[in-house]
Amino acid sequence: MIQPCRLSVLICVCDVILALLLGVIFCLPFALATSQKNSAGKDAQSLQAFRAVASVLTSPRCLNCHVPGDGPLQGDDNHPHAMNVKRGIDGKGSAALRCRACHQTENTNILHGPPGAADWQLPPSDTPMAWKGLSTGEICRNLKDPAKNGNRSLQDLIPHMDTSLVRWAWNPGPGRTLPPLSHDEFVDKLKEWIETGAACPE
Ligand code: HEC
Ligand code: HEC
């Protein structure tokens, strides 16, 4: 049975306060450690999700348009586009050789025929989002930077993945390889990365 406080009410109150204080002092480190562990777990999940996202961003279909130079690339080895095609002022070709002269809104269903999708064009030259040769960390930081991603928030990235040019990578026409994840898996990983804090590798 618990002994009632005999000396005085004051001592009794002091005991309670002391007990509470000790409890807090002992428990705090454990609480902190647990919350740190949780955030480390979340970071690891975010990093893993981003690696999956990056595996798609750096696949050939995406890289052939997301180019650092002034002309598109072709094939799984990202070689320069035939006929010295250039991006032009608007990313839709030079005045003499427009993309749409060859690229329609649908693929040509013959091997090495021009692929097609609505609005076929290169990304703007000041924000080309050229991911080839960058580390996964650099790709990640570029993707998060509004100055480099076309002035978009992280949430804006999600609907973009449903646009015709991104979707085309999963329906690229005969003879062209697909990105390593399905479109659904890719969008799920992108959302997971954002929801877990959009962590970037070193
Ligand atoms: C035919 C050329 C083409 C292909 C192929 C292409 N893109 Fe793009 N991409 C563009 C253009 C053009 C823009 C700029 C669009 C804009 O600013 O509205 C763009 C912009 C982007 C952006 C930045 C916009 C944003 O919301 O951050 C991302 C990310 C992106 N593309 C991802 C991809 C991925 C992933 C693939 C492959 C699965 C891909 N793109 C394939 C042309 C292409
Ligand atoms: C004279 C016709 C012609 C013009 C103009 C042209 N293309 Fe192409 N393009 C092709 C053909 C044909 C292919 C397919 C080559 C193959 O599969 O071997 C192709 C392939 C591509 C590919 C590669 C697809 C892949 O992933 O392998 C991209 C990207 C591309 N073109 C972008 C453009 C852009 C952007 C423009 C305008 C700036 C443009 N092209 C202008 C004919 C053209």
Image (cartoon, rainbow, N blue to C red):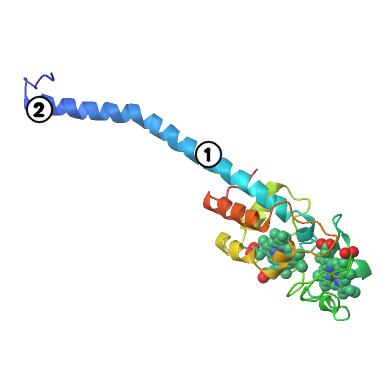
Q: Position of residue 60 (x, y in %)?
A: 80, 56
Asked if residue 148 shows in the view, the reply is: no
State whether residue 58 is above or below residue 98.
above
Q: Which residue is mark 1?
A: 41
Question: Which quadrant of the structure image shows residue 72?
Answer: bottom right
**Along the line of sight, the residue nearer the viewer: 180 or 86:** 180
- The number of numbered badges drawn on the structure is 2
**Along the line of sight, the residue nearer the viewer: 68 or 178:** 178
Question: Which quadrant of the structure image shows residue 176?
Answer: bottom right
Say which element carries label 1: helix
Q: Position of residue 12 (x, y in %)?
A: 12, 25
> What is the three-letter code of the residue carrying label 1?
Gly
State whether residue 106 is above or below residue 130.
below
Ligand 2 resides in the quarter of the picture at: bottom right
Q: CA distance from mark 1 to mark 2?
A: 46 Å
What residue occupies the far bottom of the structure in this picture?
Answer: 95
Q: Position of residue 52 (x, y in %)?
A: 66, 48
**Along the line of sight, the residue nearer the viewer: 45 or 141:** 45
- Is disc 1 surrounded by few (<14), some (14 to 19) or many (20+) residues within 10 Å? few
Report whether 50 appears left or right of 176: left
> What is the three-letter code of the residue carrying label 2?
Leu
**Along the line of sight, the residue nearer the viewer: 103 or 133:** 103
Q: Are marks 1 and 2 in contact (CB under 8 Å)?
A: no
Q: Position of residue 5 (x, y in %)?
A: 9, 22
The residue sitting at 69% across, 52% down in the picture is 181
State whether residue 133 is above or below residue 161.
above
Q: Which residue is mark 2?
A: 10
